[in-house]
Image (spheres, helix red, strand yellow):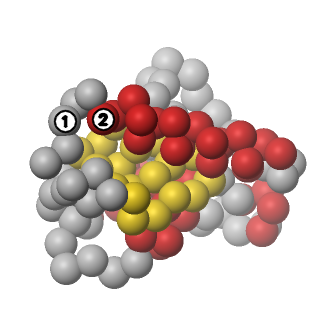
Amino acid sequence: MVRSEDYQAMLVVAIAEARLGLAEGGIPIGAATFDGEGNLLGRGHNRRVQENDPSVHAETDALRKAGRQRSYRNSTMVTTLVPCWYCGSSVRQFNIGTLVVGDSVNTASK
């Protein structure tokens, strides 16, 4: 079971992804998905600019890279910025158990 103290370490992974996206010339938003034990399933960053694809947000990238899971109920998604409606809907649709948001004040055009 993931403890709340682990969220900071998980957020470090998402921040590294955001930095990678910025270095690629994209929008600096990162995310990561972890299983119920805190093991990394997938990590990703916003690649809308790099791939000219409006659907490649950080959260969807991390979810896609996590691959198909039997259940996401015990998983944790960590993101550097509060999810947009598109990504928030994915969190809800796949019943991700915990969502950790690094920044809920700033906004970005995802």
Residue for point 48% across, 25% down:
103
| Residue beneath disc 2 | 6
| Residue beneath disc 1 | 3
Rendered image: mark on residue 65: none
Left or right, 10 with respect to 19, comes to left
Q: Are marks 2 and 1 in contact (CB under 8 Å)?
A: yes
- Can you say whether 55 is above or below 31 in the image? below
Estimate the x, y position of residue 69 in percent, counting from the top left: 27, 77
Q: Is residue 82 visible?
A: no
Question: What kind of residue is marked 2?
Answer: Asp
Left or right, 97 with respect to 90, comes to left
Residue for point 22% across, 30% down:
4
Question: What kind of residue is marked 1?
Answer: Arg
Helix, strand or loop status at disc 1: loop
Left or right, 42 with respect to 106, comes to left
- Can you say whether 106 is above or below 94 in the image? above
Estimate the x, y position of residue 26 in percent, counting from the top left: 79, 49
